[in-house]
Amino acid sequence: MGSDFDRVLAEAKAGSSVALGALYREFNPGLRRFLIARLPSEGEDLAADVWVAVAPKIGEFTGDERGFRAWLFTFGRRRLIDHFRRSGRRGPVVPLHESQDPPGRDDPETEVLARLSAADAAKLLNAHLSADQCEVLMLRIYGGLDVGEVAAAMDHTDTWVRVTQHRAIQRLSRRLSSQMDVTK
């Protein structure tokens, strides 16, 4: 969205459904992929619930585009936690299918994610990582959140996020390199 973000946000705060739609089109694909990767059967519904909750509160938001993304993903994560609490389930699940949304913007990370399907990435992360490690990487990758934003969304410190991410990457590296050695 870039330089138009401030204008679009101001219009959405003023009640423009067109501007809210523009925010939805820009930010929903990543939010949706994150929620579907964590809960395939209900991720789509949770994404809709997030927007229903965000729309009336958009006037309360202050910040830039990165801050909005972090704010939105915090809503998404809280909806996910609420769902797991209500259903008595915990932790990551492996998606059975994926319906692809177009990437929100052109950048290398989005391009890589488009090539590696959300289902494949989620299967890989869920198979080898703890729930916290999986969530940190998904928020960093799908959400495009920085360390501080992930820390705020998960109610942890920046150091905890960095350590968890480092351990997750190390664990994936060890697991994948051992799997590649077996296939040789």
Image: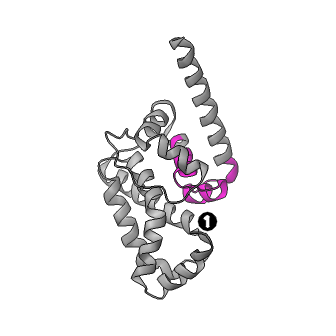
In the image, residue 135 lies in the stretch drawn in magenta? yes
Residue at image coords 61%, 65%: 66
Residue plotted at (65% across, 53% down): 147
Q: Residue 67: give x, y in percent of width and height.
A: 60, 68
Q: Is residue 34 a member of the stretch shown in magenta?
A: no
Residue 43 shown left or right of residue 158 in the figure:
left
First to last magenta residue range: 134-160
Query: In this figure, which residue is indicated by the disc labeled 1?
Result: 66
* Residue 31 coordinates in the image, percent (x, y): 45, 58
Give SS at disc 1.
helix
The answer to which image quadrant residue 16 occupies is bottom left
Observer-nearest of 114 and 180: 114
118 over 184 or under it: above or below: below
Residue at 44%, 41% in the rendered image: 117
- For badge 1, the amino acid type reads Arg
Query: In the figure, is residue 33 to the left or right of 176?
Result: left
Quadrant where the C terminus is found in the figure: top right
In the image, taking residue 163 as reference, residue 74 lies left or right, namely left
Q: At 43% from the left edge and 55% from the top edge, which residue is drawn?
A: 102
By secondary structure, the bulk of the magenta-drawn segment is best described as helix
Answer yes or no: is residue 92 visible: no
The x and y percentages for residue 124 are 47, 33
Q: Quadrant of the N terminus?
A: bottom right
**Residue 55: quadrant of the picture:** bottom left
Q: Is residue 19 visible?
A: yes
Note whether 25 is above or below 120 in the view shown. Answer: below
Q: Is residue 80 above or below residue 125?
A: below
